[in-house]
Image (spheres, rainbow, N blue to C red):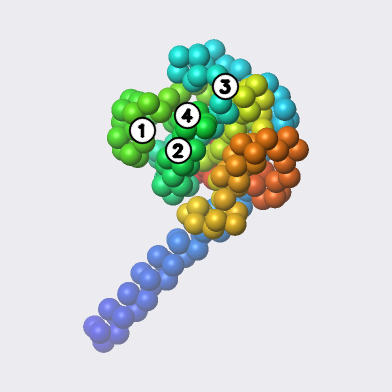
Amino acid sequence: MRKGMVVAWLILLLTGIAGLFWRSEWIYALPTPVPVNYHPVVTGTKIEWPGRTARTLPSGKPLFLHFFNPDCPCSRFNIPHFRDLVKRYGQQTNFAVVLMTNKHYTDDDIRRRFDLPSYLSVFRDSSIAAACGVYSTPQAVILDTGDRLYYRGNYNRSRYCTDDSSSYGKLALESLLRNDLHPSFDPLALKAYGCKLPTCTQ
């Protein structure tokens, strides 16, 4: 009798865990709902914000903005991928993190916690997201050398950024570095997935 109850309890527990995992995967597979007051920003739009200076982000290179929240699971999954992009293309491209959270993190907290280079700029201005048309995390935004929007979208079709064939952020950056002025992106690359703004926690 007791053994049967233990087995039944374990089955119930495992079913609950599997259900939570399935729900999490199902929610991630759905696009992030577009906010009611969303204003689309078209490719080619010049992007400006007050905090950008030549000292922090030298001109003459494309800019890769990583919209990120340390408390968003989707954001955490792609950190190794973002770190690899910085390491691989850091000589040709300026990289910066745009922190989308209400919690307080210093620049060093972010760099140390996620093993990012000490020179990497960290911005906390939520107006950058609006300027770029970003409403979820993680999202990648690439600006050309004239600060025009070249790409805004996902890093990868895979939640863990492990599918090299759909490494959208990397493919977009390589396309810009090849001076491809009329790139074609997979529709999945341009649909927002992940944690919604402003809190980026669900």
Could you tell me which residue is drawn at 73 percent across and 35 percent down?
181
Disc number for residue 86: 2
Q: Is residue 108 visible?
A: yes
> Could you say which is closer to the camera, residue 170 or residue 26?
170
Q: Is residue 82 visible?
A: no
Circle 2: element type: helix
Circle 1: element type: loop
Could you tell me which residue is drawn at 50 percent across and 63 percent down?
22
Q: Reading the chain from its start, which is encountered first: label 4 or label 1?
A: 4
Which x, y percent locates residue 179?
A: 68, 35
Indicate the quadrant where residue 149 lies: top right
Q: Compute the Cα span from label 3 to label 4.
A: 15 Å
Which x, y percent locates residue 167?
A: 57, 50
| Residue that mark 3 sits on | 60
Amino acid beneath label 3? Gly
Task: Name the front one of labels 3 and 4.
Answer: 3
Q: Compute the Cα span from label 3 to label 1.
A: 20 Å
Indicate the quadrant where residue 154 lies: top right
| Residue that mark 1 sits on | 117
Could you tell me which residue is drawn at 60 percent across and 33 percent down?
142
Which x, y percent locates residue 101?
A: 44, 31
- Whether residues under marks 1 and 2 lie with C-beta atoms below 8 angstroms apart, the answer is yes
